Image (tube, rainbow, N blue to C red):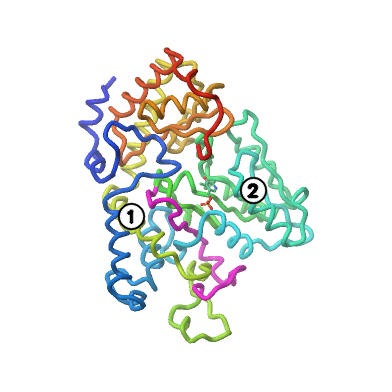
Amino acid sequence: MATAIERDQKDVLARFKQEFFQPEDQIYMDGNSLGLMSKRAEAKLVELAASWKVHGIDGWTEGAHPWFTLAEEMSTRLAPLVGALSTEVMVTGSITSNIHQMLSTIYQPTSERFVIVVDELNFPSDIYAVESHLRLRGLDPATAMRKVKSRDGHTLEFDDIVSEMTDDVALLLLPSVLYRSGQLLPIRDITEAAHGKGILAGFDLAHSIGALPHDLHEDGVDFAVWCHYKYMNSGPGGTGGLYIHERHHHLLPGNAGWFGSDKTKQFDMDHQFSKAEGAGAYQIGTPNIFSMAPLLGSIELFEEAGIDAIREKSLQLTAFLRKLIKEQLPELLDVTPEADKDRGGHIALVHPEAARICKALKQAGVVPDFRTPNIIRLAPIAFYTSFNDVEEMVGRLKEIMQGELYKNFTNNRNVVA
Ligand SMILES: *Cc1c(COP(=O)(O)O)cnc(C)c1O
């Protein structure tokens, strides 16, 4: 069994650690909630702020990254990360606003087919979006939204997803990676099964983009949404993204706005909407330039490292982490699926004292992530976590568990995590 030091010596991505800002002696395991700031991200933020200072209104068309086409410029560079054509991706909105946009564009309920299938483990915002959208269409979420049930409270079975694909279903919206357990769903198989029954398939990539490769176009996925502030390290509130398969590009945006215009006509100020050709049509208003700027720096790092190398190291880090936990801290129940093909970039550990264990970890210089009621999520990030960090983190966790140091804290959650 290779030691942490030996693993670090062989790590082809080791040099990226110094690209990120991180307090000395802190071990950051929460990059799946908010990725750390990189030097490149900071530099692009400063650069774009300077373009406002220098160019004023002319920043829309001048400078190294003209604001008018900034979203398009980044979308082209982002497309390989989700396995899409560059015309199928757009940097815009947030996960939740993009779900609203995709549903209002692509979901066409009839009296026979109107159900949207989601899952009972999904993140609340996705559910709120679907429910409120159904109400706007005059449908009752109690009958028009159905949740795939989980047998164990942590994961979903492929067969249970397929059983929900009945003749009344119009569309399904599922996560690629479940935010609590870290289960990675088989995107291609689900999409194929859905299409076989005339159902549209959409995915929320919040916990997979930047952690693993995707093949959305080849898989035939109809649409996808994601954010960039988790594994993509674009900063708090960083602009999100959407993908829509080219077979749907004829659709008018359900929520239209002038930034969805054909760019050559946008400033004609005509009341007749001329839709952009590709995914750009589903933008709404003026892009949040400063919330996109960090992504410009962050993408560079992904281009240099390559998503396959990132996935490879991420799998090794999480495998190393769960092995140490299993050997040294068996009282922490690992609920992330076993096989590599079934898991994303984090490990989920269940313990009744999870909330206060997380508080004790924070005091010990480890930043974990707590998800109510009893889950500790740990995400060693390929860019900035070393194998030595993982080993050191497990050592600090062991001291907390053996000395019952968590008893110095109350077992309830803080405001965010
Ligand atoms: C992080 C996350 C969100 C957050 O949505 P925003 O609109 O970006 O605030 C939504 N859904 C899932 C599954 C997430 O993991």
Name the residue type under label 1: Ile
Look at the image and give the residue range highlighted in magenta.
232-260
Q: Considering the image in quadrants, where does the N terminus appear?
A: top left
Residue occupying the point 32% across, 24% down: 391
Residue occupying the point 51% across, 73% down: 260
Residue occupying the point 37% across, 30% down: 366
Residue occupying the point 29% across, 60% down: 46
Between 258 and 320, which is closer to the camera in this rendering?
258
The residue where tag 2 is placed is 127
Report if residue 237 lies within the magenta region.
yes
Asked if marks 2 and 1 touch (Cβ < 8 Å), the reply is no
6 lies above or below 126: above
Q: CA distance from mark 2 to mark 1?
A: 30 Å
Give the label on residue 280, or none: none
385 lies above or below 217: above
What main secondary structure does the magenta stretch of the protein show? loop
Between 335 and 48, which is closer to the camera in this rendering?
48
Q: Position of residue 333 (x, y in %)?
A: 51, 21
Name the residue type under label 2: Ile
Q: Give the structural element (helix, strand or loop) at label 2.
A: helix
The residue where tag 1 is placed is 299
Q: Position of residue 59 (x, y in %)?
A: 33, 74
Q: Earlier in the sequence, mark 2 or mark 1?
A: 2
Q: Quadrant of residue 12?
A: top left
Q: Residue furthest top?
A: 402
Q: Quadrant of residue 91?
A: bottom left
Using residue 55 as the reference point, say whether residue 102 is left or right of it.
Answer: right
Using residue 116 as the reference point, say whether residue 41 is left or right of it.
Answer: left
Report if residue 86 lies within the magenta region.
no
156 lies above or below 288: above
Q: Position of residue 329 (x, y in %)?
A: 43, 17
